[in-house]
Image: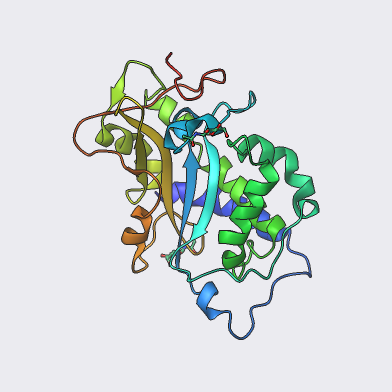
Amino acid sequence: MRHRLVPLLAVLCAAVAACGRDEYEPGDGDEAFCSWTCAIFTLQWPGGFCQSLDNASLCQIPQRVSTWMIHGLWPMNVRECCGCWPMFLSDVQELREALENRWPSLLKSRSGFHFWRDEWEKHGACAACVEGLNSPLRYFQTCLKLRQYFDLHKVLEGGGIRPSCDRTYKLTEVQDVLFPLVGDKCEIQCVKDEQEREVWFQVKILLSRNLTVGCRGHGAERAARASTGHPCPARGTFYFLPINHERPLRPCG
Ligand SMILES: *[C@@H]1O[C@H](CO)[C@@H](O)[C@H](O)[C@H]1NC(C)=O
Ligand SMILES: *[C@@H]1O[C@H](CO)[C@@H](O)[C@H](O)[C@H]1NC(C)=O
Protein backbone atom coordinates (compact mmCIF):
# COMPACT_ATOMS: atom_id res chain seq x y z
CA MET A 1 0.00 0.00 0.00
CA ARG A 2 2.82 2.36 0.80
CA HIS A 3 3.74 3.05 -2.79
CA ARG A 4 0.16 4.13 -3.44
CA LEU A 5 0.33 6.77 -0.78
CA VAL A 6 3.03 8.81 -2.45
CA PRO A 7 1.22 9.84 -5.63
CA LEU A 8 -1.96 10.53 -3.71
CA LEU A 9 -0.20 12.87 -1.33
CA ALA A 10 1.61 14.45 -4.21
CA VAL A 11 -1.61 15.36 -5.99
CA LEU A 12 -3.19 16.60 -2.80
CA CYS A 13 -0.20 18.75 -1.95
CA ALA A 14 -0.57 20.27 -5.37
CA ALA A 15 -4.14 21.15 -4.46
CA VAL A 16 -3.11 22.58 -1.12
CA ALA A 17 -0.32 24.60 -2.66
CA ALA A 18 -2.97 26.63 -4.47
CA CYS A 19 -4.12 28.06 -1.14
CA GLY A 20 -4.55 31.80 -1.08
CA ARG A 21 -5.37 34.23 1.70
CA ASP A 22 -9.13 33.89 1.42
CA GLU A 23 -9.08 30.68 3.40
CA TYR A 24 -11.76 29.55 5.72
CA GLU A 25 -10.79 30.00 9.37
CA PRO A 26 -12.76 27.83 11.76
CA GLY A 27 -14.26 29.80 14.60
CA ASP A 28 -16.55 29.20 17.56
CA GLY A 29 -19.44 26.87 16.92
CA ASP A 30 -17.85 25.15 13.94
CA GLU A 31 -16.97 21.99 15.83
CA ALA A 32 -20.20 20.17 15.06
CA PHE A 33 -19.72 20.26 11.34
CA CYS A 34 -15.94 20.28 11.30
CA SER A 35 -15.41 17.31 13.58
CA TRP A 36 -15.36 14.62 10.94
CA THR A 37 -12.65 12.00 10.88
CA CYS A 38 -13.66 9.93 7.87
CA ALA A 39 -15.01 10.76 4.46
CA ILE A 40 -16.41 8.82 1.57
CA PHE A 41 -15.38 9.47 -1.98
CA THR A 42 -18.05 8.08 -4.27
CA LEU A 43 -17.64 7.27 -7.93
CA GLN A 44 -20.53 6.24 -10.10
CA TRP A 45 -20.72 4.06 -13.15
CA PRO A 46 -22.99 5.68 -15.78
CA GLY A 47 -23.88 2.24 -17.15
CA GLY A 48 -25.79 1.55 -13.93
CA PHE A 49 -26.86 5.02 -12.93
CA CYS A 50 -30.24 5.13 -14.67
CA GLN A 51 -31.22 1.88 -13.00
CA SER A 52 -30.66 3.56 -9.63
CA LEU A 53 -33.40 6.15 -10.21
CA ASP A 54 -37.02 5.78 -9.22
CA ASN A 55 -37.97 7.33 -12.50
CA ALA A 56 -35.43 6.19 -15.04
CA SER A 57 -36.80 8.40 -17.80
CA LEU A 58 -35.19 11.33 -15.99
CA CYS A 59 -31.66 10.23 -16.77
CA GLN A 60 -29.36 10.93 -19.67
CA ILE A 61 -25.74 10.11 -20.39
CA PRO A 62 -24.00 12.89 -22.33
CA GLN A 63 -21.85 11.68 -25.23
CA ARG A 64 -18.61 12.72 -23.59
CA VAL A 65 -19.31 10.52 -20.57
CA SER A 66 -17.68 7.16 -21.06
CA THR A 67 -16.14 6.13 -17.77
CA TRP A 68 -16.39 6.41 -13.97
CA MET A 69 -17.69 9.77 -12.78
CA ILE A 70 -17.56 11.58 -9.47
CA HIS A 71 -20.64 11.52 -7.31
CA GLY A 72 -19.19 13.32 -4.32
CA LEU A 73 -16.81 13.61 -1.39
CA TRP A 74 -18.74 13.32 1.82
CA PRO A 75 -17.40 13.89 5.31
CA MET A 76 -19.06 11.35 7.59
CA ASN A 77 -21.10 11.79 10.72
CA VAL A 78 -21.46 15.52 10.42
CA ARG A 79 -24.73 16.72 11.81
CA GLU A 80 -25.41 19.26 9.12
CA CYS A 81 -23.51 21.71 7.02
CA CYS A 82 -24.05 25.34 7.80
CA GLY A 83 -25.98 26.69 4.83
CA CYS A 84 -23.95 29.82 5.13
CA TRP A 85 -21.51 29.39 2.30
CA PRO A 86 -23.27 29.89 -1.02
CA MET A 87 -21.50 28.76 -4.14
CA PHE A 88 -21.60 30.43 -7.52
CA LEU A 89 -20.57 29.22 -10.91
CA SER A 90 -17.82 31.84 -10.96
CA ASP A 91 -16.23 30.06 -7.96
CA VAL A 92 -15.40 27.07 -10.14
CA GLN A 93 -15.25 28.73 -13.55
CA GLU A 94 -11.68 27.57 -14.16
CA LEU A 95 -12.66 23.97 -13.42
CA ARG A 96 -15.85 24.01 -15.38
CA GLU A 97 -14.69 21.92 -18.30
CA ALA A 98 -12.99 19.37 -16.06
CA LEU A 99 -16.11 19.16 -13.92
CA GLU A 100 -18.37 18.73 -16.94
CA ASN A 101 -16.14 15.86 -18.02
CA ARG A 102 -15.68 14.16 -14.68
CA TRP A 103 -18.64 15.26 -12.58
CA PRO A 104 -21.55 15.67 -14.98
CA SER A 105 -25.18 15.66 -14.01
CA LEU A 106 -26.84 12.57 -15.39
CA LEU A 107 -30.28 13.99 -14.70
CA LYS A 108 -32.07 15.78 -17.51
CA SER A 109 -33.64 18.21 -15.09
CA ARG A 110 -30.41 19.27 -13.41
CA SER A 111 -27.46 21.18 -14.83
CA GLY A 112 -23.90 20.29 -13.90
CA PHE A 113 -23.71 23.43 -11.82
CA HIS A 114 -26.82 22.53 -9.85
CA PHE A 115 -25.35 19.13 -9.08
CA TRP A 116 -22.04 20.66 -7.92
CA ARG A 117 -23.77 23.31 -5.87
CA ASP A 118 -25.96 20.70 -4.16
CA GLU A 119 -22.89 18.63 -3.35
CA TRP A 120 -21.07 21.66 -2.01
CA GLU A 121 -23.98 22.77 0.16
CA LYS A 122 -24.76 19.28 1.42
CA HIS A 123 -21.22 18.01 1.90
CA GLY A 124 -18.48 20.37 0.77
CA ALA A 125 -19.28 23.19 3.15
CA CYS A 126 -18.84 20.78 6.07
CA ALA A 127 -15.51 19.56 4.80
CA ALA A 128 -14.22 23.08 4.64
CA CYS A 129 -12.23 23.10 7.87
CA VAL A 130 -9.55 20.95 6.27
CA GLU A 131 -6.76 22.55 4.33
CA GLY A 132 -7.15 21.87 0.64
CA LEU A 133 -10.95 21.66 0.97
CA ASN A 134 -11.54 25.10 2.39
CA SER A 135 -13.34 26.81 -0.47
CA PRO A 136 -15.57 25.63 -3.30
CA LEU A 137 -12.65 25.93 -5.70
CA ARG A 138 -10.33 23.86 -3.55
CA TYR A 139 -12.97 21.28 -2.69
CA PHE A 140 -13.71 20.63 -6.35
CA GLN A 141 -10.03 20.74 -7.29
CA THR A 142 -9.26 18.13 -4.67
CA CYS A 143 -12.15 15.95 -5.81
CA LEU A 144 -10.87 16.10 -9.38
CA LYS A 145 -7.42 15.04 -8.18
CA LEU A 146 -8.94 12.19 -6.22
CA ARG A 147 -10.80 11.11 -9.34
CA GLN A 148 -7.56 11.17 -11.28
CA TYR A 149 -5.85 9.10 -8.63
CA PHE A 150 -8.67 6.58 -8.24
CA ASP A 151 -8.61 5.47 -11.84
CA LEU A 152 -10.98 2.55 -11.46
CA HIS A 153 -11.22 2.00 -15.18
CA LYS A 154 -7.51 1.34 -15.56
CA VAL A 155 -7.31 -1.01 -12.62
CA LEU A 156 -10.45 -2.93 -13.59
CA GLU A 157 -9.34 -3.19 -17.19
CA GLY A 158 -5.96 -4.47 -16.01
CA GLY A 159 -7.73 -7.08 -13.91
CA GLY A 160 -9.89 -8.24 -16.81
CA ILE A 161 -13.08 -6.71 -15.42
CA ARG A 162 -14.88 -5.08 -18.31
CA PRO A 163 -18.43 -3.93 -18.90
CA SER A 164 -20.46 -6.66 -20.53
CA CYS A 165 -24.03 -7.54 -21.39
CA ASP A 166 -23.44 -11.22 -20.80
CA ARG A 167 -20.72 -11.73 -18.29
CA THR A 168 -21.39 -11.35 -14.61
CA TYR A 169 -18.90 -10.85 -11.81
CA LYS A 170 -18.46 -12.03 -8.28
CA LEU A 171 -17.94 -9.54 -5.50
CA THR A 172 -14.67 -11.13 -4.37
CA GLU A 173 -13.28 -10.97 -7.87
CA VAL A 174 -13.94 -7.23 -8.11
CA GLN A 175 -12.70 -6.59 -4.58
CA ASP A 176 -9.46 -8.43 -5.25
CA VAL A 177 -8.75 -6.35 -8.33
CA LEU A 178 -9.59 -3.05 -6.63
CA PHE A 179 -7.91 -3.80 -3.32
CA PRO A 180 -4.46 -2.34 -4.10
CA LEU A 181 -6.07 0.96 -5.08
CA VAL A 182 -8.94 1.38 -2.64
CA GLY A 183 -8.21 -1.00 0.23
CA ASP A 184 -10.69 -3.33 1.86
CA LYS A 185 -13.03 -0.70 3.29
CA CYS A 186 -14.58 0.32 0.04
CA GLU A 187 -18.13 -0.59 -0.82
CA ILE A 188 -19.13 -1.95 -4.19
CA GLN A 189 -22.75 -0.93 -4.66
CA CYS A 190 -25.48 -2.39 -6.78
CA VAL A 191 -29.07 -1.62 -7.66
CA LYS A 192 -31.72 -3.89 -9.09
CA ASP A 193 -32.71 -3.22 -12.66
CA GLU A 194 -36.15 -3.71 -14.22
CA GLN A 195 -35.47 -7.40 -14.60
CA GLU A 196 -34.51 -7.70 -10.93
CA ARG A 197 -30.90 -8.28 -11.82
CA GLU A 198 -28.15 -6.91 -9.61
CA VAL A 199 -26.34 -4.15 -11.49
CA TRP A 200 -23.14 -2.46 -10.32
CA PHE A 201 -23.45 1.33 -10.21
CA GLN A 202 -21.22 2.83 -7.56
CA VAL A 203 -18.01 2.51 -5.54
CA LYS A 204 -17.63 4.19 -2.19
CA ILE A 205 -14.07 4.67 -1.05
CA LEU A 206 -13.41 5.28 2.62
CA LEU A 207 -10.84 7.99 3.31
CA SER A 208 -9.25 9.50 6.40
CA ARG A 209 -9.36 13.18 7.10
CA ASN A 210 -6.00 13.50 5.40
CA LEU A 211 -7.56 11.81 2.35
CA THR A 212 -5.49 8.66 2.50
CA VAL A 213 -7.27 5.35 1.92
CA GLY A 214 -9.04 3.75 4.87
CA CYS A 215 -10.30 5.17 8.13
CA ARG A 216 -10.68 3.94 11.68
CA GLY A 217 -13.17 6.54 12.80
CA HIS A 218 -16.12 5.31 14.82
CA GLY A 219 -19.28 4.78 12.86
CA ALA A 220 -17.34 4.51 9.63
CA GLU A 221 -18.76 1.11 8.77
CA ARG A 222 -22.30 2.04 9.63
CA ALA A 223 -22.44 5.30 7.74
CA ALA A 224 -20.66 3.80 4.76
CA ARG A 225 -23.70 1.62 4.22
CA ALA A 226 -26.44 4.24 4.43
CA SER A 227 -27.35 5.49 0.96
CA THR A 228 -29.16 4.65 -2.28
CA GLY A 229 -28.35 1.23 -3.54
CA HIS A 230 -26.99 -1.59 -1.48
CA PRO A 231 -23.79 -3.55 -1.26
CA CYS A 232 -23.50 -5.89 -4.22
CA PRO A 233 -24.41 -9.37 -3.04
CA ALA A 234 -21.58 -11.35 -1.49
CA ARG A 235 -23.18 -14.51 -2.84
CA GLY A 236 -24.12 -14.80 -6.46
CA THR A 237 -23.02 -12.40 -9.16
CA PHE A 238 -23.86 -9.03 -10.62
CA TYR A 239 -23.72 -7.24 -13.94
CA PHE A 240 -21.29 -4.51 -14.94
CA LEU A 241 -23.24 -3.12 -17.87
CA PRO A 242 -21.79 -1.09 -20.73
CA ILE A 243 -22.59 2.59 -21.13
CA ASN A 244 -25.10 3.14 -23.90
CA HIS A 245 -25.79 6.81 -24.66
CA GLU A 246 -28.84 6.09 -26.80
CA ARG A 247 -30.40 3.62 -24.40
CA PRO A 248 -29.01 4.50 -20.97
CA LEU A 249 -31.58 2.48 -19.06
CA ARG A 250 -31.44 -0.65 -21.20
CA PRO A 251 -27.88 -0.61 -22.49
CA CYS A 252 -28.15 -4.15 -23.78
CA GLY A 253 -31.38 -3.62 -25.71
C1 LIG B 1 -41.09 10.20 -15.01
O1 LIG B 1 -40.64 11.44 -15.52
C2 LIG B 1 -41.29 11.80 -16.74
C3 LIG B 1 -40.59 13.04 -17.27
O2 LIG B 1 -40.61 14.07 -16.33
C4 LIG B 1 -42.76 12.00 -16.47
O3 LIG B 1 -43.42 12.35 -17.68
C5 LIG B 1 -43.35 10.70 -15.93
O4 LIG B 1 -44.68 10.89 -15.58
C6 LIG B 1 -42.56 10.23 -14.70
N1 LIG B 1 -43.01 8.91 -14.33
C7 LIG B 1 -43.29 8.58 -13.09
C8 LIG B 1 -43.70 7.17 -12.87
O5 LIG B 1 -43.21 9.35 -12.17
C1 LIG C 1 -3.45 9.93 7.57
O1 LIG C 1 -4.32 9.69 8.63
C2 LIG C 1 -4.29 8.35 9.11
C3 LIG C 1 -5.39 8.19 10.14
O2 LIG C 1 -5.39 9.24 11.06
C4 LIG C 1 -2.91 8.05 9.67
O3 LIG C 1 -2.86 6.72 10.14
C5 LIG C 1 -1.88 8.24 8.57
O4 LIG C 1 -0.59 8.06 9.08
C6 LIG C 1 -2.00 9.64 7.97
N1 LIG C 1 -1.13 9.69 6.82
C7 LIG C 1 -0.41 10.75 6.50
C8 LIG C 1 0.49 10.62 5.34
O5 LIG C 1 -0.46 11.78 7.14
Here the colouring is rainbow
x and y percentages locating residue 169 in the rendered image: 29, 27
Numbered-mark total: 0
Furthest toward the bottom, the residue is 28
x and y percentages locating residue 201 in the rendered image: 42, 35
Q: Check the image and report above or below for 123 versus 28.
A: above
Q: In the displayed structure, does residue 117 sit left or right of residue 90?
A: left
* Displayed quadrant of residue 98: top right
* Displayed quadrant of residue 100: top right
x and y percentages locating residue 249 in the rendered image: 47, 25
Q: In the displayed structure, does residue 105 sit left or right of residue 204?
A: right
Identify which residue, 114 or 34, lies in the foreground.
114
Identify which residue, 22 or 76, lies in the foreground.
76
Looking at the rendered image, the quarter that the C terminus falls into is top left
Q: Check the image and report above or below for 98 versus 76.
A: above
User: Residue sitting at 43 percent across and 67 percent down?
Assistant: 77
User: Residue sitting at 37 percent across and 33 percent down?
Assistant: 200
Furthest toward the top, the residue is 253
Q: In the displayed structure, does residue 102 sit left or right of residue 158?
A: right
Identify which residue, 209 or 29, lies in the foreground.
29
x and y percentages locating residue 248 in the rendered image: 51, 24
Furthest toward the left, the residue is 235
User: Residue sitting at 55 percent across and 33 percent down?
Assistant: 58
* Displayed quadrant of residue 106: top right
Q: Check the image and report above or below for 231 versus 78.
A: above
